[in-house]
Amino acid sequence: MNRAFLQAAVLASVLLSACASDQVIVLPEEGTIGGVVVEKGGEKTVLDKPYAEESHGLFGASNGMSNEAEVKAGYSGALEAQPIPPKKYTLYFVEGSDTLVPASKAEFDEIFKEIAARKAAEIVITGHTDTVGSREENDKLSRERAHSIEHLFTERGIPGDSLVAVGRGQRELLVPTPPNTPEAKNRRVVITVR
């Protein structure tokens, strides 16, 4: 092989790899924005606005703003390959029990449509209570609520290894209330399907 040709091939390879760039674009999710810190060569840039972007390539770093249309046009393959975003459902209970209120019983069926849209659903069931009763009683009741929903899923054929049921008691009140205050919106389970 000609030595000059080999050097040209190596140089072309180096130039091509040097022209490649790293790019980060912040995408909004369900109307919320997080943030990311991009660090390259000891320099840090915070991206915390929708479609903010940072690129690093042969000619250094550049940052700016993209938009939804540009991202869809330039990254349609990557966007289509993303997993379906998680979906949350909230079901409510009769006071002091693990029995769903009638409206939540009807909504429970909607969850199965979401599960069917996913190839391998993972379901997290988090039980909650209001502030009526002791912390220990509410911890137990929140676990019972989560396990009652877990049981409904397994009765309908959802494998147990795709379910996680936990209780949070009165620790994460949807509606803040003083101790021993009944509040229907706090007596709930949150089901996250991902």
Image: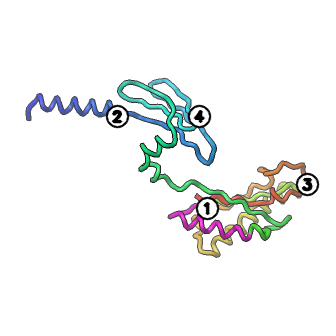
Image location of residue 1, percent across then percent down: 8, 35
The answer to whether residue 68 is left or right of residue 103 is left
What residue would you read off at disc 4? 48
All told, the count of numbered labels is 4
Which residue is located at x 57 percent, y 38 percent?
50
What residue would you read off at disc 1? 123
Mark 1 touches mark 3? (CB < 8 Å):
no
Callout 1 amino acid: Ile
Residue 151 falls inside the magenta stretch: no
Which residue is located at x 64 percent, y 75 percent?
155
Circle 1 sits in a helix, a strand or a loop, which is it?
Answer: strand
**Main SS of the magenta segment?**
helix
Q: Nearer the viewer, residue 125 or 21?
A: 21
What residue would you read off at disc 3? 180
Instruction: Decide which of tag 2 and tag 1 comes sooner along the chain.
Output: 2
What residue would you read off at disc 2? 20
Image location of residue 89, percent across then percent down: 68, 60
Marks 2 and 1 sit apart, C-alpha to C-alpha, by: 39 Å
Instruction: Decide which of tag 3 and tag 4 comes sooner along the chain.
Output: 4
Marks 3 and 2 sit apart, C-alpha to C-alpha, by: 61 Å
Q: Say above or below: 141 vs 23.
A: below
Callout 4 amino acid: Asp
Instruction: Decide which of tag 4 and tag 1 comes sooner along the chain.
Output: 4
Q: Nearer the viewer, mark 3 or mark 4?
A: 4
Instruction: Decide which of tag 3 and tag 2 comes sooner along the chain.
Output: 2
Magenta extent: 105-122
Callout 3 amino acid: Asn
Image quadrant occupied by the C terminus:
bottom right
Q: Nearer the viewer, residue 54 or 75?
A: 75
Disc 4: CA contacts within 10 A as few (<14), some (14-19) or many (>=20): some
